[in-house]
Image (cartoon, rainbow, N blue to C red):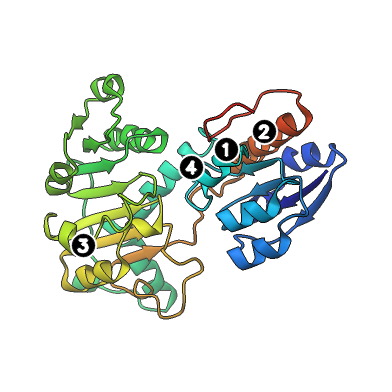
């Protein structure tokens, strides 16, 4: 077996997943992803399995990879970089790892929130530059206790954010077309039947939904105009959910009080990306799930998934719906 391994956090983080993969005796070819379509097309056709992150696995890549390719094992849960419909049509299994990174992403969400509301990054940068403000010059932040946090997407990660928000004394609102009513009741969450209602009522909006044609660019000039002035927006989902130009404009005008995001619509971003250097904006480099604990869980599950499918021995979790 020849396996293409592209996810960098898998490769860079020590753990048992390395021994599990090595024990197969398979030939492992390592690349530093995420790889664009051009590079994937160059490599396609030579591998029995992909152990991938956010590489561009388009219909063309799938076609060139077949019939050698037996499975795509995704490190993570986001499948928007993979042409799932085409893979399903070609009876190519896509495996993924639900339930492995919800804790660490939820924690990162609150790191961004506290960084913005307490002016932590702004002040730390000023202190590091030798500017210890005195008296009235010191920045003044805000408490999050008592604030309304709207969670857009109440899946595994959204639920973990809700639990932590309740612990901070926040009022939690949520919108999800497939709402878990038992969870909502148990955690005293206000369910919004429409997304517009959530956007209108929230002091803080946290995005935890999948990227799809319907959600692409959903946070734009029009939706921002419906929000409370000074709203804090958090994005630990996908950068493409947000119109970057609209967000920068809203930050500059003060319409949005702060934007904390672990993702961008272009990764890595060009030097002139509109959100680099935007006021009241914290951007991290897609590291929300990059903890030793989470990497170990994701990498272990992705590896075991691939081994189980290719050897026919064991269970695996498949994302596209057909029998292999």
Of the residues under marks 3 and 4, which one precedes in the sequence? 4
Q: Residues within 10 Å of mark 2 (few under 14, many from 20)?
A: many
Q: Nearer the viewer, residue 217 or 82?
A: 82
- Whether residue 247 sits left or right of residue 79 in the image: it is left
Q: Position of residue 132 (x, y in %)?
A: 34, 74
Of the residues under marks 1 and 3, which one precedes in the sequence? 1
Residue 233 in view in this figure: yes
Dot 4 corresponds to which residue?
104
- Which label lies toward us, 1 or 3? 1
Q: Position of residue 268 (x, y in %)?
A: 51, 68
Tell me if label 3 and label 4 are in contact, CB under 8 Å. Answer: no
Q: Position of residue 8 (x, y in %)?
A: 65, 56
Tell me if label 1 and label 4 are in contact, CB under 8 Å. Answer: no
* Gap in angstroms between the C-alphas marked 2 and 4: 22 Å
* Gap in angstroms between the C-alphas marked 1 and 3: 36 Å
Q: Position of residue 219 (x, y in %)?
A: 25, 57
Give the number of the disc on residue 257. Answer: 3
- Whether residue 176 sits left or right of residue 211 in the image: it is left
Q: SS for tag 3?
A: strand
Above or below, 213 against 277 in this view is above
Quarter containing the C terminus: top right
Quarter containing the N terminus: top right
Of the residues under marks 3 and 2, which one precedes in the sequence? 3
Rendered image quadrant of residue 322? top right
Q: SS for tag 4?
A: helix
Dot 1 corresponds to which residue?
96
* Gap in angstroms between the C-alphas marked 3 and 2: 43 Å
Q: Nearer the viewer, residue 204 or 50?
A: 50
Of the residues under marks 1 and 2, which one precedes in the sequence? 1
Rendered image quadrant of residue 130? bottom left
Of the residues under marks 2 and 4, which one precedes in the sequence? 4
Residue 230 in view in this figure: no
């Amino acid at each position: 077996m020849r396996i293409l391994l592209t996810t960098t956090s898998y490769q860079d983080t020590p753990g048992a997943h390395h021994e599990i993969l090595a024990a197969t005796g398979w030939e492992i070819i390592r690349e530093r992803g995420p790889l664009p379509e051009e590079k994937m097309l160059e490599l396609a056709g030579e591998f029995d399995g992909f152990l991938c992150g956010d590489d561009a696995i388009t219909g063309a890549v799938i076609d060139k990879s077949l019939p050698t390719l037996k499975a795509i094992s995704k490190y993570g849960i986001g499948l928007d970089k993979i042409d799932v419909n085409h893979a399903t049509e070609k009876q190519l299994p896509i495996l993924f790892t639900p339930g492995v990174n919800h804790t660490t992403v939820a924690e990162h969400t609150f790191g961004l929130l506290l960084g913005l509301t307490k002016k932590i990054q702004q002040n730390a940068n000023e202190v590091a530059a030798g500017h210890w403000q005195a008296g009235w010059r010191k920045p003044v932040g805000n408490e999050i206790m008592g604030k309304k946090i709207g969670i857009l997407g109440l899946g595994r990660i959204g639920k973990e954010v809700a639990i932590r928000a309740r612990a901070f004394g926040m009022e939690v609102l949520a919108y999800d077309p497939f709402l878990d009513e038992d969870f909502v009741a148990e955690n005293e969450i206000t369910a919004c039947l429409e997304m517009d209602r959530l956007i209108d009522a929230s002091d803080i909006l946290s995005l935890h939904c999948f990227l799809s044609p319907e959600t692409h660019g959903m946070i734009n000039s029009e939706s921002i105009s419906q929000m409370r002035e000074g709203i804090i927006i958090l994005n630990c989902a996908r950068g493409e959910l947000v119109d970057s130009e609209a967000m920068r404009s809203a930050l500059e005008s003060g319409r949005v009080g702060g934007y904390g995001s672990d993702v961008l619509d272009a990764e890595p971003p060009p030097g002139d990306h509109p959100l680099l250097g935007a006021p009241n904006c914290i951007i991290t480099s897609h590291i929300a799930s990059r903890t030793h604990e989470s990497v170990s869980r994701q990498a272990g599950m992705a590896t075991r998934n691939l081994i189980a499918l290719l050897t026919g021995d064991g269970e695996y979790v498949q994302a596209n719906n057909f029998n292999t």
